[in-house]
Amino acid sequence: MAVSRRKFLQGGAAAAALALTGGKAEASADSSEMRTKGLKSSTTICPFCAVGCGLVVSTKNGKVVNIEGDTEHPINQGALCSKGSALFQVANNERRLQKVMYRAPGSDKFEEKSWDWAMDKIAQRMKETRDKTFKAKEVNKKDNKEYVVNRTEGMAFLGGAGLDNEECYLWSKFGRAMGVANLEHQARI
Amino acid sequence: MTNHWIDLKNADAILAIGCNPAENHPISMKWIEAAMDQGGKLIAVDPRYTRTASKADYYAQIRPGTDIAFLGGMINYAIQNNLIHEEYVREYTNASFIVNEKFDFEEGMFCAFDDQEKSYDPKAWAYASDAAGNPKRDKSLKDPRCVYQQLKKHYSRYDVDKVCSITGTKKEDYLAVAKAFCSTGRADKAGTILYAMGITQSTHGTQNVRATAMLQMLLGNIGIAGGGVNALRGESNVQGSSDYGLLFHLLPGYLKSPEFDNVDLKAYLEKWTPKTKDAKSANWWGNTPKYTVSLLKAWYGDNATAENGFCYDYLPKRSGNYSFMKLMENMGGGKLEGLVCMGQNPAVGGPDSLKTRDALGKLKWLVTVDLWETETSIFWKRPGVNPKDIQTEVFMLPAASSVEKEGSISNSGRWAQWRYKAVEPVGNAKSDMWIIDKFAKKMKELYAKGGAFPEPITKLAWNYGHGEEPEVHMVAKEINGYFTKDMTIVDKDKTLEFKAGDQVPMFKYLQDDGSTVSGCWIYCGSYTKDGNMMARRDKTDLPNGLGMFPKWSWCWPVNRRIIYNRASVTPDGTPFNPKRAVIAWDGLEKKWKGDVPDGPWPPMNDAKEGKNPFIMVPEGFGRLYALDMKDGPFPEHYEPIESPATNLLSKVQNNPAVKVPKDIVPDAAKFPFVGTTYRMTEHWQAGAMTRSLPWLTELVPDMFVEISETLGRAKGIKNGDMVKVTSQRGSIECVALVTSRLKPFNVQGKQIEQVGLPWHFGYAGAATGDSGNVLTPSVGCANTSIPEFKAFLCNIEKGGKRA
């Protein structure tokens, strides 16, 4: 990994101190003010558990250079747990996916593709599957009557607990428009 | 949560059962400790001596999967010792309702069970009705057929000795817990119950939750500050994703997804709109038509008209169960061609994961949208398989992180909080919003040229600006909802004028005639003419000082911070506890003060307009006795499907309403130990979001298994040894952590050992390890189909080779 142990200590100590005390850092070289002076800051909410702790993200030249607990947030009052304190390493991490990757049937490797290529292909697959497995009507076994069901049998959509509300809403809207009944997410498990 | 995180500070007793807040929701401890500073008692009930237990005033050990025995015993204890909040029980719950003559419970079974179908007919459990069709009541609670007497009889079987011989809890510990928590059954005391997956991941999980709610109703603890039934949700927006209907049985706002025999909108509304004949019942779900039509208008815009049933036909209709486990079974059976995973990792997160990984190979195509490579996206090159044998086409799409996009998420306390975009996504990563938008636009393009039933796609309203991705504020405004034409609404003494396009201020103004749009009715009020309420950062608290912070962010419904708060006051509207008044009726001004009340009506005793407090059920009273559970009106103890013990309360070993797959054959001789899975602070869920973060992997680098010192000695396993853990479904290897935090249970005179496993690991990411879910069974709750991860049979041997 790119982050050395030294950097780990430098970055982590202040966050750890905050996590332990929950109070404001003292005015030292490690203080929030010193760390974020002259930087652009915006607030966010932690992406891990559902306590909903606030954090402040500071950026310089389009890069995240510091993330720490939001002292103004009424729930966490600046404190963070070990996961929340590590959000910086989600934003800056060489293992993050940066390219669209494709694995062909039977292949032993991923290959890089463009978004255009991938989105065209995926749309084609979705349409093929929907057209092939769409069930307009079915006969119910119990009463032997035919019912309109307008359902795509062959496709499933999973996930959503890590998405924003507005994304969840559009995913829900799109999924049902596609006729997907196999629509599930983390709350079921 | 009925309440919210900061409200924990208002509790006199906090019962954490089936959750471990110090470990999994660490910042919640700030508010638990604030309560403790004021003399509040923390009670931890858990199979393991957890981080929460180490901070607790009382700790009781409980065998996994025996929560109903534990809680049923507390219900019995509260009743036998006259600790219940009598006025609350009489006035606000269905304790006084008379149950019909046919209702019966005998030898572990409720009446009306169909042995062939393995299901009950809940209609047989209905209330007895009077001539007008209203439920009969006896407010003296003495009628032997009233709910209270039935409840008392049912739980009289749960005496302390019987309970402890089932749960393996020490009697003195059990009594200390029961005494400490049931002491909150007074008007001036508040007790809260916190729970998480230890309660839900069970074949009787819904009844576990019900047992917590029933105990809280008996103690008068719902609707009050420092009270409630509070689910500690594990993912940052799992509340929101549930709110928006990403579950097979739901549409946004907890409307039901249509079933095959809801043949048109009229039939759908007839089926799902509850009715009441009681003028005192608000029966809030009676508004279902308004919310459904407003949703259809949000989805199909001008195409949705009264004449075409607002495009109801375009919605898919379900026939049966499409829950996660069923879906995996169908995938394994080759019934699915395609799967899209939006940040979900089923190869680690679901039960019986070897089977799931095989099932992924039956897909024709798989799309994963994630920040990382996950076990799901690289399943075709997982250890032990030859990629050549797997024909699934895989598209692995890079997604933006939470600081690289803008939008809201909803925490466990229902607070929708706004996040800002700090930087552009890394590399070529895109937001989920961008990706979903591209899918939708491509499908619209393709279906414009034809295909199977193209209208649901071609006619879908999808107007979110002309940018590179949907304008998130336009989406948020559609979710809140707006008027489609000029409207004049008379609300009591006010006449309100709205123009077409104006945001709807709150859901009571939504209409069932197409004149309003709302993508999710419970979020109506989140984005109004005053702007984005979710982005608010005003920390002014109410004068009551209870920490509600009503101007910080926005919470559903209608910014009500504590739901069912009409039950926090007497029927005259006076707070049960004036020191922690959530709401109070001002008789002079004729209005409520404090939190947003559960409906605007005056207190229940107001002869003309008063309403019953539990507005979401048609009778308006909290249900000590349920009418619509699949497995009985009262929670009854049954053993987990895989258990080393026999049921001591009846001859019925397992929940009779659970269909057990044929391949699960419990064998306590071969697998003598109780396995249970759990989470830890340093990792998160299926691990993708943490196992590639150096700070966290340095803290917890390896998969491990926790066992007791006695089991360690018996098996010759020392701390740090590699071991093999096996269940009927597979084997994993990991490092042994031999600890005094785990102790065997004394159950029916036998020592039963437990084996504890985190489930965060897998073969992708920087820190890898075997997955705990290789061992867990694919069998779930009778009501929700949530798998029984928390209690299964396993064995453990020294030495690291997998079977």
Image: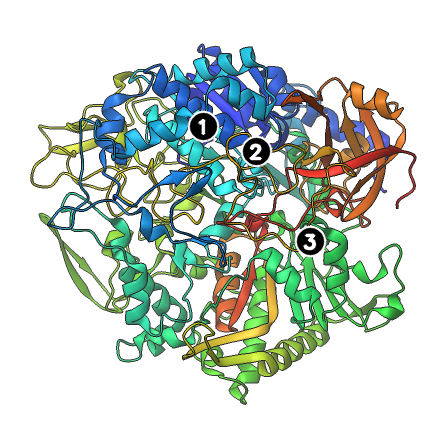
Q: Which element is circle 1 on?
A: helix
Q: Chain of mark 2?
A: B
Position above or below: B437 against B129 = below
Q: Chain of mark 1?
A: B
**In this figure, which residue is indicated by the disc labeled 3?**
B345
* B453 with respect to B627 (left or right): right
Spatial CA span between label 1 and label 3: 36 Å
Q: Amino acid at mark 2?
A: Asn
Q: Residues within 10 Å of mark 3 (few under 14, many from 20)?
A: many
Residues beneath discs 2 and 1 located on the same chain: yes
Position in image of residue B569 (x %, y %): 23, 27
Q: Quadrant of the N terminus of chain A?
A: top right
Spatial CA span between label 3 and label 2: 35 Å
Question: How many marks do you count on the picture?
Answer: 3
**In this figure, which residue is indicated by the disc labeled 2?**
B647
Which of the 4 quarters of the picture holds residue B605?
Answer: top left
For residue B72, the mark is: 1
Q: Residue at coordinates 14% horizontally, 38% vertically from top-left?
A: B610
For residue B653, the mark is: none
